[in-house]
Amino acid sequence: MHPVFNVGLLEPYPEDPIGRHQFAMPAPDIVDSEPSYVVAKVVDSRSYGNPKSKLPHRFVQYLVAWYGYGREENCWEPFEMLEGTAMQALVNFHHRSPSKPRDHRVSDAPMRGKKRQH
């Protein structure tokens, strides 16, 4: 046996009853044949790894909000995924939240002359 469903019972997906507008997510830029997304801001950070280890054996992950995407798309990323492209967002986050875990490679000084993150 195989599952069968009568096509006559299908109906179009209904519009949102509250009338919320569904936003289309932006397509990522392609850099070196890989998708590249823009960091809107860093929302949080956390340490992970062996709690008895000292740096650099303990790692820091950052909760990233992506430009053009909703909160449900926020995700935890290691520093290495943000290095170079989101350094200003990391610096801004640590200025707002100095007591949060910080990767030892994130500078204290704000970057000048670099393109600002959205």
Image: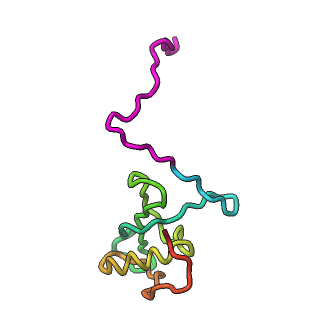
Residue at 33% x, 33% y is 17
In the displayed structure, does residue 101 sit left or right of residue 90? left
Locate residue 32 relative to residue 18 in the image: left or right: right
Give the answer, above or below, for where 42 lies relative to 91: above
Q: From which residue to which does the magenta span run?
A: 1-24
Residue at screen point 39% across, 51% down = 72
Name above or below for residue 56 compared with residue 5: below
Q: Nearer the viewer, residue 112 or 84?
A: 112
Q: Is residue 20 magenta?
A: yes
In this view, the residue in front, 58 or 13, is 13
The extreme left residue here reads 99
Residue 89 rendering spot, x and y as whole percentages: 45, 74
Residue 5 located left or right of residue 50 = right
Residue at image coords 67%, 63%: 31
In the rendered structure, does residue 60 fall within the stretch colored magenta? no
Q: Is residue 61 left or right of residue 115?
A: left
